[in-house]
Amino acid sequence: MSLTLPSDFTLRESTRKFIDSGPKQLLINGAWVPALDGQTFSTVNPANGEELAQVALAGVEDVARAVHAARAAFEMGPWSQMSGAERGEYLWRLADLIDQHADELAELETLDNGKPLRVSRRGDLPAASKHFRYYAGWASKLEGSTIPVSIPNQFVYTLREPAGVVALIIPWNFPLLMAAWKLAPALACGNTAILKPAEETPLTALRLGELVLEAGFPDGVINILTGPGEPTGAAMAANMGVDKVAFTGSTETGRKILRAAADSNLKKVSLELGGKSPNVIFADANIESAIKGANWAIFSTAGQECVAGSRLFIERPVYEQVLDGLRQQAERIRVGSGFTPKVHIGPIVSAAQLERVMGYIEGGREQADLVTGGQRLGGDLAEGYFIQPTIFAHQKDDLPLVKDEIFGPVAAVTAFDSMEELVARANSTAYGLAAGVWTQNLSKAHRFAQAVKAGTVWINGYGMFDAAAPFGGYKESGFGREMGKEALDLYTRVKSVWVSI
Ligand code: ADP
């Protein structure tokens, strides 16, 4: 495969070897296999539109094969009978292998997703291995409880058992990290898994599959299927042999998955969906750090983040000052290939997403005031999917630009006058994933944190995550909490055992 990269960047030997190793296959029952009907699709580099690899496209029958393998591994294999402590050792081994191959995995992530290499290497990669280590610890701590009941001579206890075969469907914005968010707790709890990366970014999940084999996981415990939402993802969600589906992606697809579960075997479902998160700057905030933080909250990852701080509320007395600061910051952001040193943000992930984001920008020009940005970048970036950081100022909350999740570098900025108005407007959205608030007044910060309908609130900061802190949505941002000990509920079932004594 010929790869066009910035002239001063050389890809590692191992990364190139993986790219050059031919069409990528499916991992089913511990072996790499092509799709039964031989279909493939291509994954491209969003920085220049070049094909990176041909990848197997799993059909309905491939999904059935993977479910069969995962079922056999769950019911008959050593995995679910193994002690939690031993399962934890496998997770720990996988974490070590991720760290050992972090440079290569980061390069693959940047090739496939576009994000700056520095971000892949220093952000996504260590977060992924930490996730496996965090849940390696939980594998040996899955406890039930004893229940005092009112009926005499009965001893009641609970067992926390794995859900069974779990389907893990993930998006393209943090490909390897999302795989870790889902695989680590699922495996710690003793489930067997079928992972489907997004069709835009399959490469790091596939390389992870090789590391899974190297770590010696029993066959069928981790299966990896590549392909688009239809047919691959849809077949996973509808499969009668899948006990649970965990999904991260758009609200629209979340609804389809819920319907597929309802129409098949009522499998357990958890959904981490879209967001349109409010980020609030009060007049008494440390304005300099609030501007920097708010700028990063929307523009890091080019806005391609479910928690992006895309709705900015600024208290009236500092509105002009903050808006001007945001504009200056946005204009200083360096957009370019993720392999160019000192680049802040990379491209939009695909041509389709680019078109969608530009559609919102074009519509926004007529409905709101364009403060800065608004253009697709040309010149030597013309082959890729690059958009300028874009800010709109508005006073109407029902504009598409303000209501819809754009998933691009587009901020909608508005002024507010009172806490009451702020809370009503911040909550006037179908979403409820995250929120930010910047103020030096403690009680204001906590009042807002309690009043906002969001699963995560950051005070005087934005976008922090840790494997130990639960994360998930309110309202149409989904349900179920990933990370922390809460994620154990997603991947286990509780059994009550009654003993007459
Ligand atoms: P986005 O719009 O951000 O690409 P999607 O929700 O479409 O988000 O995609 C997230 C993940 O869901 C991807 O892995 C995609 O292939 C998968 N997906 C898309 N449609 C379906 C579907 N109908 N059933 C199951 N998975 C799907």
Image (cartoon, rainbow, N blue to C red):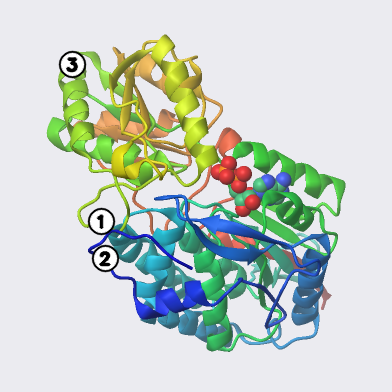
- Pick whichever, 181 or 327, lies toward us: 327
Q: Nearer the viewer, mark 3 or mark 2?
A: 2
Tell me the element at label 3: helix
Ligand 1 within 8 A of label 1's CB?
no
Badge 2 amino acid: Phe
Q: Mark 2 — residue?
A: 9
- Pick whichever, 238 or 382, lies toward us: 382
- Splitting the image into 4 quarters, where does residue 214 fall? bottom right
Q: Can residue 369 be seen in this view?
A: yes
Residue 340's disc is 1
Q: Mark 3 — residue?
A: 320
Name the residue rendered at 75%, 78% in the picture: 74
Choose the circle earlier in sequence order: 1 or 3: 3
- Splitting the image into 4 quarters, where does residue 331 fall? top left
Whether pointer 1 and pointer 3 mark residues with C-beta atoms closer than 8 Å, the reply is: no
Tell me the element at label 1: loop
Tell me the element at label 2: loop
Image coordinates of residue 53 in percent, x first then y, are: 55, 64
Badge 1 amino acid: Thr
**For residue 2, above or below residue 289:** below
Measured in 3D between alpha carbons, the distance from the residue under mark 1 to the one under mark 2, in whole angstroms, is 8 Å
Measured in 3D between alpha carbons, the distance from the residue under mark 1 to the one under mark 3, in whole angstroms, is 34 Å
Q: How crowded is mark 3: few (under 14 residues within 10 Å), some or many (20 or more)?
A: few
Ligand 1 within 8 A of label 3's CB?
no
Query: How many discs appear?
Result: 3
Name the residue rendered at 50%, 14% in the picture: 398
Image coordinates of residue 94 in percent, x first then y, are: 49, 80
Whether pointer 3 and pointer 2 mark residues with C-beta atoms closer than 8 Å, the reply is: no
Whether pointer 1 and pointer 2 mark residues with C-beta atoms closer than 8 Å, the reply is: yes
Q: Residues within 10 Å of mark 1 (few under 14, many from 20)?
A: some
Measured in 3D between alpha carbons, the distance from the residue under mark 3 to the one under mark 2, in whole angstroms, is 41 Å
